[in-house]
Image (cartoon, coloured by chain):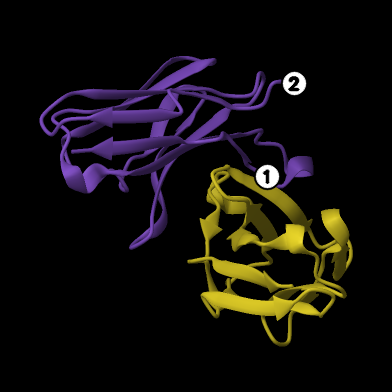
Chain colours: A purple, B yellow
Amino acid sequence: DAGVIQSPRHEVTEMGQEVTLRCKPISGHDYLFWYRQTMMRGLELLIYFNNNVPIDDSGMPEDRFSAKMPNASFSTLKIQPSEPRDSAVYFCASSLNRAVYFYEQYFGPGTRLTVT
Amino acid sequence: AQSVTQLGSHVSVSEGALVLLRCNYSSSVPPYLFWYVQYPNQGLQLLLKYTSAATLVKGINGFEAEFKKSETSFHLTKPSAHMSDAAEYFCAVSVKSSASKIIFGSGTRLSIRP
């Protein structure tokens, strides 16, 4: 299996621009998670989906952030407009919700976002 | 609600020395516990997991962790550190009713001295 795929790996943009991060989960997984990692705040859960439906978006910092999962193999995290404080590494993870797998999550390599 | 606390944001050991990374959890129901490792510029990778089958859990790269209910702890150990063990380590907790949500600790950065 190719694992969780994220694109782009690096993104540099100017303040005010729209940024779209992409994620392809492991085939067959029914949960998808978006995390943000910074030195100051550590690893934060932003939102997660079950069977393409958003379950909990309480971690989304503000209305500038939005996430979609149009099908089981693709999800996007969009920031519009972007701000310098959004600079971070964004991770996507997926899991298979079966008791035998104990909710183990598989992480992608991350997207390093820099907003200037 | 569940939570984990990792004691020590940075641990430094000499190559060949014992590695001990501390994690305490809080959960009102039997937890599932995990250790993840993050190498520089990479995503998190599962190191090992406790799922109630055995209190001593062995993982990859020679790491192991022991679940101690009386101490609400799940400390990570390795008898002999290797330079390649330098990374960030995260303790995490989940429970059956959490709908697959995992709560991560703040992480411990492990440095290895030559």
Look at the picture and state if A47 lies above or below A74.
below
Q: Which residue is mark 1?
A: A104
Is B87 or B101 nearer to us in this picture? B87
Residue placed farthest to the left in the image? A16
The chain letter under disc 1 is: A
At label 2, counting other C-alpha atoms closer than 10 Å, the crowd grade (few under 14, some 14-19, many 20 or more) is: few
Q: Which residue is mark 2?
A: A1
At label 1, counting other C-alpha atoms closer than 10 Å, the crowd grade (few under 14, some 14-19, many 20 or more) is: many
Look at the picture and state if A15 lies above or below B85.
above
Mark in the foreground, 1 or 2: 2
Query: Residue at left 40%, top 43%?
Result: A89
Query: Residue at left 70%, top 87%?
Result: B71
Q: Are marks 1 and 2 on the same chain?
A: yes
B21 sits to left or right of B4: right
Is A57 or B10 nearer to us in this picture? B10
B62 sits to left or right of B21: right
The kind of residue on which mark 2 rests is Asp
On the rendered image, what quadrant is the N terminus of chain A found in?
top right
The image shows residue B97 at horizontal and vertical percentages of: 58, 52
Mark 1 or mark 2: whose residue is earlier in sequence: 2
